Image (cartoon, rainbow, N blue to C red):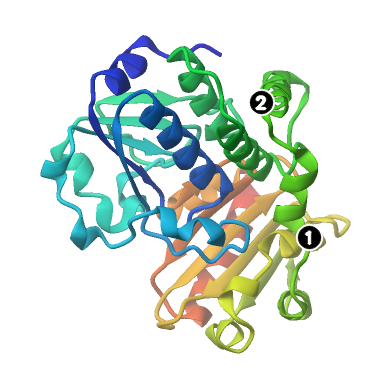
């Protein structure tokens, strides 16, 4: 796909750029930030990377030190503009949200939900990963993709496509981008190993606990499970393997929707991840609860204790199944 001229001009004419990604970042967010930051630095910009974290996902934890996470140390007056990646609503920027209120802001994203913001918006819901849009921007700047940028972009693309399992026949362009990234130095084998291999024994206990707590509702059309704050204390939050939990439960015959509710440390709020295999739009479910995402993968936070959060999620899923959205 082509990159909007106004976005290209924005990054070319912004000498001091801060790149910000969403809270609880995933591979698409981190890959987009790091690849774009590398390219813009090569183009002569002074780049600062910010992300509120936390960096609990095992595959992104190694990149933690490359980001400012304390918003109290960032002064908007130090920058000329902001690029926000993989984020559909400014409130998902955590403490960095006020930056976009004071500076010209370009948004690069592919989510369908959220509250639109930004001076310039490059938002394409049909594109399966933000890294594809970042790839388009880097090439529009006339830059060759470096091996590091190729690895980061391929990482993000693999994350949001479930290593290409979620793509349909109309999304062939993203596979073409993947081929170009491989040509530039990305390794599918190394990426897959980093994402899925060498898991700890504690991660299998996490998986077992999620599976033993599962509640199949709506005659088996949906699965609901949870993880407690005590699980994280005893097993280590960095050992949680969300992908394995999602894959195991979505593989159950008849399951169209999955919700995993994770109690946060303070026990007064929960993070929820939704996944779908059928026609139910889980982004719409998440949006009603203050979150967002994609049709088949979305999330939100509920500022209620675990028991109440489970009740709210259960009710929301049942309602969506009744209405087919």
Give the residue displayed 58% in from the left and 59% down from the top: 273
Q: CA distance from mark 2 to mark 1?
A: 24 Å
Q: Quadrant of the N terminus?
A: top right
- Label 1 secondary element: loop
Residue shown at 69% from the left, 49% from the top: 276
Question: Is 145 above or below relative to 74?
Answer: above
Q: How many numbered marks are there?
A: 2
Q: In this rendering, which labeled residue sits more in front, label 2 or label 1?
A: 2
- Is 8 placed left or right of 242 in the picture? left
Q: Residue at x 20, y 53 (%)?
A: 74
Is residue 221 visible in the rendered image? The answer is no
Say which mark, if any, is on residue 77: none
SS class, disc 2: helix
User: In the rendered view of the protein, which quadrant contains the C terminus?
Assistant: top right
Circle nearer the N terminus (2, 1): 2
The residue that label 1 is drawn on is 197
| Within-10-Å neighbours for mark 1: few <14, some 14–19, many 20+ | few
Q: Tell me: 31 left or right of 182.
A: left
Query: Nearest the camera: 202 or 142?
Result: 142
Q: Is residue 67 visible?
A: yes
- Front position in the image: 90 or 322: 90
Residue bearing the label numbered 2 = 184
Among all residues in the image, which is located at the extreme left?
A: 77
Q: Position of residue 223 (x, y in %)?
A: 72, 64
Identify the image quadrant of residue 283: top right
Q: Mark 2: few, some, or many residues within 10 Å (few <14, many ≥20)?
A: some
Residue 117 in the image: state x and y as whole percent.
29, 35
Where residue 265 sits, quadrant-wise, is: bottom left
Rendered location of residue 240, percent (x, y):
64, 71
Name the one closer to the observer, 109 or 256.
109
């Amino acid at each position: 796909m082509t990159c909007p001229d106004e976005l290209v001009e924005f990054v070319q004419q912004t000498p001091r750029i801060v790149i910000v990604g969403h809270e609880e970042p995933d591979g698409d967010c981190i890959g987009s930030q790091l690849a774009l930051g590398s390219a813009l630095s090569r183009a002569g910009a002074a780049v600062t990377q910010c992300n509120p974290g936390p960096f609990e996902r095992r595959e992104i934890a190694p990149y933690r030190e490359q980001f400012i996470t304390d918003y109290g140390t960032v002064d908007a007056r130090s920058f000329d503009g902001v690029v926000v990646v993989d984020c559909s609503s400014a409130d998902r920027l955590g403490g960095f949200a006020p930056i976009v209120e004071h500076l010209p802001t370009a948004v690069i994203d592919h989510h369908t939900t959220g509250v639109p913001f930004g001076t310039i918006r490059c938002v394409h819901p049909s594109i399966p990963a933000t890294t594809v849009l970042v790839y388009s921007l880097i090439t529009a700047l006339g830059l060759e993709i470096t091996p590091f940028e190729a690895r980061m972009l391929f990482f993000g693309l693999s994350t949001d496509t479930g290593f290409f399992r979620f793509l349909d026949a109309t999304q062939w362009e993203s596979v073409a981008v993947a081929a170009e990234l491989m040509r530039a130095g990305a390794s599918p084998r190394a990426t897959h190993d980093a994402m899925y291999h060498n898991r700890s024994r504690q991660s299998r206990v996490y998986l077992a606990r999620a599976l033993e707590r599962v509640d199949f509702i709506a005659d088996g059309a949906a699965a609901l499970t949870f993880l407690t704050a005590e699980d994280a204390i005893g097993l280590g939050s960095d050992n949680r393997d969300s992908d394995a939990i999602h894959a195991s439960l979505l593989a159950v015959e008849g399951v169209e929707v999955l919700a995993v509710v994770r109690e946060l440390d303070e026990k007064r709020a929960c993070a929820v991840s939704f996944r779908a295999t059928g026609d139910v739009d889980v982004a719409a479910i998440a949006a009603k609860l203050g979150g967002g995402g994609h049709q088949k993968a979305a999330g939100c936070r509920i500022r209620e204790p675990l028991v109440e959060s489970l009740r709210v999620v259960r009710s929301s899923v049942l309602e969506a199944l009744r209405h087919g959205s």
